Image: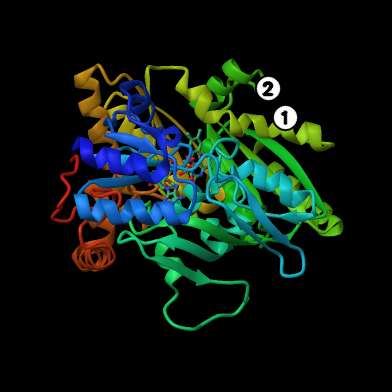
Amino acid sequence: MDASVLRRLEGIVGRDNFFSSLEDRLVYAYDATPKLEHLPAAAARPADAAQVQAIMRLANDAGFAVVPRGSGTGLSGGAVPVANSIVLLFPSWNRILEIDTENLTAWVEPGVITAHFHAAVEARDLFYPPDPGSMKICTLGGNVAENSGGLRGLKYGVTKDYVMGLEVVLPTGELLRTGGKSVKDVAGLSLKDLFIGSEGTLGIFTKILFRLVPKPAAARTMLVLYDDMAAAAATVSAIIAAKIIPCTLEFLDAMTIRCVEDYAHVGLPTNIEALLLIEVDGHPAAVADEFEKIRRLCEQHGARAVHVAHDAAEADKLKTARRAAFSALARMKPTTILEDATVPRSAVEPMLRRIHEIARRHNVTFGIFGHAGDGNLHPTCLTDERDHDEMHRVERAFEEIFDAAIELGGTITGEHGVGLSKKKFLEKIAGPAGMEVMRKIKSVLDPNNVLNPGKMFDLKPRCETIA
Ligand SMILES: Cc1cc2nc3c(=O)[nH]c(=O)nc-3n(C[C@H](O)[C@H](O)[C@H](O)COP(=O)(O)OP(=O)(O)OC[C@H]3O[C@@H](n4cnc5c(N)ncnc54)[C@H](O)[C@@H]3O)c2cc1C
């Protein structure tokens, strides 16, 4: 990037908030997605929305790309820099601006860590349900940009179900405020919904208004062990058919269980085929009733053992089995590729069988865990990116897994987004007309294609992008 442009950028944010040494640029060259990295020209920490606006105007004027970044935990390459780009950082935008206990809303800055927000609202007996596995590190801005889900998605939905309003800097530098505290609002197109899940391509969030709900008065947790994967899947269907919606209904397969036990030592037998982590929450009487019904359904459907947590500390220990799944698998091989092929929940069992069959046929190693209650599975490949022959087989296996998900009525991503890693599959889901509409929206909002270009899909770029 031209040195005079870098000087103008430095002039906007100040010397202390501008980073252009090789060491600094390396730090922001990647996110949590394997096999993707690219050096940015620089990174900048804007102090306020006016500085973000000034940077976007300069980007349009000088022709460079801007890549917003939260904590870099994204799993589809959304925050990976593109050619001729600067990365925008928001670590000091970490204030919870208001918790409104009358309207049950909260205004936050985009750099607030998700788990910090949970703690702050729960201290007021309120609840913000979206709980991505990365919640101790990821930011609320990243969550809105990816429309992140979590373990409580089955009952409570995902991030979009809690966003009521946004302040957004548009790619051309204008400031847009959309939504508000009114529970009902049908004035015009719902613009906020356009920005949720837009993966940093349509605007930069500078403030977010969230809806909160009352904190559930009670919760109970159980961990259920199975000798047979089909029995675990049948239990999931039976619970839903009994019209019980647990807040958490998570699945781990045999490979993941063995890795978790080896890593976290939670006392799991390593000869089981599957486990379910189940939590119900709500009014204490309803929780007690639903918990007993679920326990009986587990036993009727062939559970080997049901471990019940008697207090919050024990519940936390049982949840470790699920929360440790990704880290436990990641220790096994140099490269871990975590995907999130998603199917209607009635198709979870056939999808699990298809993934195991595909992995066997391509001679690659997969652990599978995920949100069984909402059909969002995480087939996780343990591999080594230096082994080109194996990587070729891994890519073929993932292509077949995405095709299987689509055949079963599902989708290529349930929560991690498209970014760079899945853009070649997007048309299979969106179709040519869907792609055309998305490209038109992007072109109207970002005529020079300067905001996170080349993510999700390609336009004819003014700024070159990486393929
Ligand atoms: C161990 C692990 C577990 C995970 N578990 C889950 C899970 O359970 N559920 C789930 O959904 N995801 C999960 N993820 C994926 C990831 O944590 C989420 O996508 C998360 O929302 C990313 O937040 P971040 O702050 O790290 O954003 P980043 O990775 O930095 O950025 C993600 C996207 O958001 C954009 N962005 C960031 N800030 C802004 C802003 N202010 N304005 C506009 N765009 C912005 C970026 O450009 C990028 O496109 C997991 C990841 C890991 C590593």
Taking the image as shown, residue 424 lies to the left or right of residue 380, namely: left
Q: Residue at x 42, y 71 (%)?
A: 191
- Looking at the image, residue 81 lies above or below residue 205: above
Q: Is mark 1 within 8 Å of ligand 1?
A: no
Secondary structure found at label 2: loop
Towards the viewer: 128 or 155: 128
Percent across and percent down for residue 398 are 29, 37
- Looking at the image, residue 218 lies above or below residue 193: above
- Looking at the image, residue 433 lies above or below residue 295: below
Q: Which residue is drawn at 23% across and 35% down?
A: 396
Towards the viewer: 412 or 351: 412
Q: Which residue is drawn at 45% across and 49% down?
A: 415
Write down the residue under mark 1.
Answer: 317
Q: Are marks 1 and 2 in contact (CB under 8 Å)?
A: yes
Percent across and percent down for residue 253 are 51, 32
User: Badge 2 local density, few (<14 within 10 Å), some, or many (20+)?
Assistant: some
In the rendered image, which quarter contains the N terminus? top left
Residue 155's mark?
none
Q: Is mark 2 within 8 Å of ligand 1?
A: no
User: Badge 1 local density, few (<14 within 10 Å), some, or many (20+)?
Assistant: some
Alpha carbon distance from label 1 to label 2: 7 Å
Instruction: Name which residue type carries label 1.
Output: Lys
Towards the viewer: 465 or 325: 465
Q: Earlier in the sequence, mark 1 or mark 2?
A: 2
Percent across and percent down for residue 230 are 52, 41
Secondary structure found at label 1: helix
Q: In which quarter of the image is residue 382?
A: top left
Residue 410 in view of the camera: no
Percent across and percent down for residue 68 are 39, 46
Write down the residue under mark 2.
Answer: 266
Instruction: Name which residue type carries label 2.
Output: Val
